[in-house]
Image: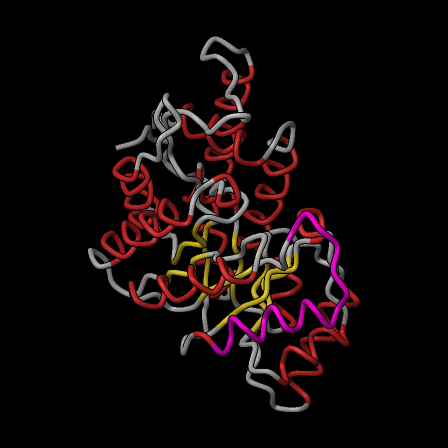
Amino acid sequence: MITGSLVPNITCFRANGEVDVEQTKRHMRWMFSKGVDGLFLTGSYGSGPLMSLEERVAVFQGAREVADEFSGKVLIPHVGCIDTASTVALAKEAERIGVDAIGAVPPFYYQYEEKLIIEYYRAIVEAVQIPVFAYNNPSTSRFTFNFGTVRALQEIGLAGLKDSPLSLGFITRVYYDAKLHNKDFQIIMGTSTGWLPLYDMGIRAAIAGMNNWAPEIMTELMRATFAGERDRAEKAYLLMLDLSAKMHFTDSTIASLMGLRVRGFDAGSVRAPMQLPPSDDPKYAQIEAWLKDGFALLDLPYTSFK
């Protein structure tokens, strides 16, 4: 079972739009050193849909190199593409590199019947020997998983579901059905929202965007949760929710890059048509104030990037 706090980590780009693998690796290394348990690579935060297959493979390889410097770090590359053939090719490359599992959003842009979505995942599951997680993100894929979809995917060997919408009825039904019928099927939260109550239910992993720019807070939340320090966990959880809400003033990738700049890490540029606010934008000072107040609330040292 995959456990702990993972990150939908950003991909760093140079000013000319090229992927900066070395700077991306530097960011990965920093997050691991701050307690992050694993990486969800080239998803929405990681600009995967804006990248070529070769670029995504280069990020996977870089992540493997960084993870080998540590112990027990989890790698889940996101391999979802707009077409089945590219998704399968990327899945095979990820397996060749040596990762723990792969995740895939349904094919996006066009709208597909459920039976075609199931065949898409069948092709991925049959192409690799490592666990395959479906990624439920209807805001990008135009497809929403339901209980029937999940049961059909379980029958073809899907290992689990990364869920972002956090529909309580859906999540609890899938979870308790798997538990009641002894299915080897894991739900990974695609957000840190809902972490504490869903942990109480039995979910043990979350992929949190905050890990990109404030991994210390998520690490403390997870530590306190697993240690049974409920008061401390609740305090950290409320802080996480407050900071997350404040940072939702723009696209999550842009907000993460701005948070990193405030922490002293220059993640470079973004790939057009995305655009970062200029360094003199007053929002940076506001973000820094939020972060310093939050770290102080938990008595955590606020440090610049090293």
Please report the bounds of the magenta region as a residue range.
108-126
Q: Position of residue 274 (x, y in %)?
A: 54, 26
Left or right? Give the position of 23 relative to 50: left
Residue sitting farthest toward the front: 85
Left or right? Give the position of 65 relative to 112: left
Q: Which is nearer the eye, 173 or 150? A: 150
Q: Which is nearer the eye, 270 or 161? A: 270
At 54% from the left edge and 68% from the top edge, which residue is drawn?
Answer: 133
At 53% from the left edge and 56% from the top edge, which residue is drawn?
Answer: 80
Q: Please name the colour scheme applied to the rendered image.
A: secondary structure
At 40% from the left edge and 78% from the top edge, which residue is drawn?
Answer: 129
Displayed quadrant of residue 18:
top left
Residue sitting farthest toward the left: 69
Q: Position of residue 156 (x, y in %)?
A: 60, 83
Q: Is residue 154 magenta?
A: no
Vertical side of 46 occupied by 267: above or below: above
Q: Is residue 115 magenta?
A: yes
Vertical side of 306 occupied by 43: above or below: below
Q: Position of residue 221 (x, y in %)?
A: 50, 52
Residue sitting farthest toward the bottom: 181
Vertical side of 288 occupied by 204: above or below: below
Displayed quadrant of residue 290:
top right
Magenta stretch: helix, strand or loop mostly: helix
Q: Position of residue 58 (x, y in %)?
A: 31, 48
Quadrant that contains the C terminus: top left
Vertical side of 200 occupied by 112: above or below: above
Displayed quadrant of residue 127:
bottom left
